[in-house]
Amino acid sequence: MVQITNLEPEVFEGINVAADWIQDLKSSNSRKHKEKVIERALIASRLGSSSAQCFLYNCYLAYNPFYVYRVKQIPETEGLENKENPWIEFWGLLEDLRTLQHSGKRATTAIENMSVRFDSDEWNLVARPVLGKDLRSGISTKTLNAVLKNTEWQIPVFECQLAQDSENNARHLSGRKWIEPKLDGVRALAVVTHSSVTMYSRSGKVLHNFENLEKTISDNKEIFSSESKFGNRFVVDGEIVSENFQELMTQLHRKSNTNLKDAMYYIFDIIPLSHFVAGESSIQQFYRHEIVQDIVEKLQSRATNIKGLQGIEVDLSTSEGHNIMHRYAKSSVDDGFEGIVIKDLNAPYTAGRSNAWLKWKPSITVDLKIVSVEEGTGRNAGRMGALICQGQDAGREIKTNVGSGFSDSQRDDIWKNKAEMLGRIVEIKCDSVTHNQSGTYSLRFPRFLRFRGFMPDEKI
């Protein structure tokens, strides 16, 4: 947490932050302009400007992915001026919300009472967006950290370990490995502290509709803590599955009428929270795997919605080990799984894509961004015929037309909302990535599989 204890509390009282900083950020859509504003704030903070310090701390509170305030409705105010603007007390309120000292009606009342103590500009342009975890001024964690890296205001980055495609990493298919089925669900990480359990997507977005899973982990926190010896601050990694993937995706961000009672959380990793925030852990895979197995065994009689993954250990230094892996992979696909994940038992934890985890599927899937929507011909005239998709995968720039894998209703809906489709990420199934004579890449037999998010650039 950013330290502000060296500053006198009263210097933050009554400060007008919005006019000097937020308004300046909003005055231009240029990324360079926004970075310049943040740079000026950093310099001003170093020179003792309490307004700049207040602004940067609010940025930190808004964009730190590990600070969750669990607020759905935040009031706006109108016409309030010459108020006390009690930033110290506002930050105290955020801490109470974050640690669940305030929740439900008590939280709503506390926020309402706080809102009328601020000038309307201060509340609506700064305090309210902080509560909503987005300053709505065209900046992101990446923009902030481009300037604030290695300072006390640097925003922690939420990044989990990801698997590389085994097709391009055959040299790593050697040694002791743990092999388990690859589930067709939503990657979910439970961040556990002494006061709360919060479910996140792999990109760091809070998954609000899994209170039942959060409660199960909270009710059994002692088991997780005692078996792992990680204390009361750790991260559980796993996959949420239900009988219907598309229905699961639809339910993820609904604010009401959610129906996720059949959701099952298959856990496969656990590390200390401090290691996760750092992006690496020296704790080897075999030890983390043993901890998860012990936790799952203890939970069998206590939790019906948390399970572990069955798998096998093989030595891929031998031909027999490879034969076992291929038979297991075929069996997993026959049983309805996407494929298998191959984990190096001696590897540490590393955020981002790592050769420590390799994935194998009978066909390849690639996530690309929609850059254009083409009208169809023949029976598809007047509706979507193909998506033009582009992006990078394993360092290769890929561009491809995807015209199969859609239902008629999907073609109609995409064409009707084609402007909103631009920038959305789709998962495309294909037989292979092909190298064009021009030096670019395309996909062999691409088929639309699913949208990976609901908004441009969102990947869930």
Image (cartoon, rainbow, N blue to C red):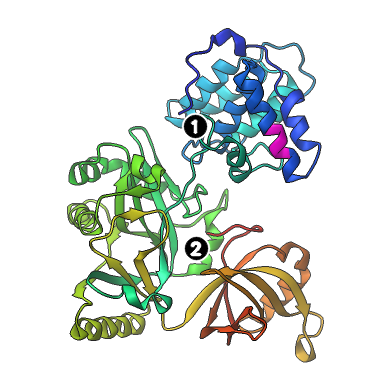
Question: Compared to 32, does 411 lie above or below?
Answer: below
Q: Position of residue 101 (x, y in %)?
A: 43, 25
* Residue appearing at x 66%, y 21% in the figure: 44
Please report the residue visible at 47 percent of the width from the left and 47 percent of the height from the top: 158
Residue drawn 24% across the image and 70% down it: 177
Residue type beneath disc 1: Gly
Residue 81 image point, x, y percent: 77, 15
For label 2, the residue is 248
Label 1, residues with CA under 10 Å away: few <14, some 14-19, many ≥20: few
Q: Position of residue 441 (x, y in %)?
A: 61, 79
Q: Is residue 18 magenta?
A: no
The residue drawn where x is 73% and y is 76% is 412
The reply to whether residue 262 is visible in this rendering is no
Q: Is residue 224 visible?
A: yes
Q: Which residues are magenta?
A: 34-38
Name the residue carrying label 1.
Answer: 104
In primary-sequence order, the first of circles 1 and 2 is 1
Residue 153, located in which quarter of the rendered image?
top right
In which image quadrant can residue 318 be found? bottom left
The secondary element bearing badge 1 is classed as helix
